[in-house]
Amino acid sequence: SYELTQPPSVSVSPGQTARITCSGDALPKKYAYWYQQKSGQAPVLVIYEDSKRPSGIPERFSGSSSGTMATLTISGAQVEDEADYYCYSTDSSGNHRGVFGGGTKLTVL
Amino acid sequence: EVQLVESGGGLVQPGGSLRLSCAASGFTFSSYWMHWVRQAPGKGLVWVSRINSDGSSTSYADSVKGRFTISRDNAKNTLYLQMNSLRAEDTAVYYCARDIDGSYPDYWGQGTLVTVSS
């Protein structure tokens, strides 16, 4: 079955740039999406279609994709950005089966 | 305001069944695809199933195929997940989420906890 691979953890100091990667064989043909999940809360979409930001999401969140890797970048990370981040995409079966990466714990301290 | 409210979770014995519901409001439910996503305690998000806007097309993760059935009632603005032959590894918070066209979930409910244990 199709898999998306993320690093388990990323750590930065406040104000630094955090980069979280997501690799998958179908990413050259499929968009990547990114969700933020804070402890005890439902996930929130922060990036869609590789690089678009939903309304209400701070400009410090950006996304990019090249080849088999998508990247979520948080420029000038804030303490309130500490959360789990998940990438999401669909497989190439044509049946719209979803898949999440394993998640990355972002620590900002 | 978009609202998705899951219900129906609880404690069930291995081999048992449970039906989850997701009540939608604040948007035109019949125009959206819908997903179920689960999260075991302390673990990551796992996609479970999705259904298209009129209910004519569904798909499932391999881990639940043949045991779970997704359905919807557009007249009642409600999404369902019928879960049969439950296993301990199905223990998780189950979230419903909407999707405009099968591309990605955008809004999520708060989840309902399913515990499979004897």
Image: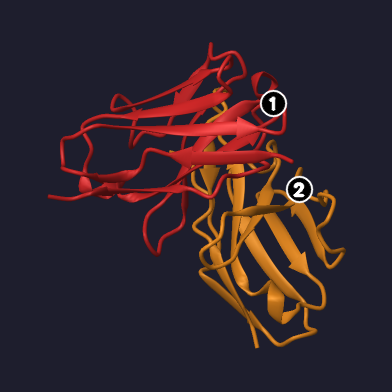
Chain colours: A orange, B red
Residue B1 in the image: state x and y as whole percent: 74, 41
Residue B106 makes an appearance in the image: yes
- Nearer to the camera, B22 or A49: B22
Towards the viewer: A34 or B14: B14
Per the image, the residue denoted by label 1 is B101
Is A64 displayed left or right of B57 in the figure? right
x and y percentages locating residue B17 in the rendered image: 24, 32
Amino acid tagged 2: Asp
| Image quarter in which the C terminus of chain A is found | bottom right
Q: CA distance from mark 2 to mark 1?
A: 17 Å
* Residue shown at the point (76%, 43%) measured from the top left: A49
Categorize mark 1 by other alpha carbons within 10 Å: few (<14), some (14-19), many (20+).
some
Q: Is residue B52 above or below residue A76?
A: above
Outermost residue, left side = B118
Q: Residue at x 57, y 28 (%)?
A: A96
Chain of residue at mark 2: A
User: Which is nearer the eye, B2 or A32?
Assistant: B2
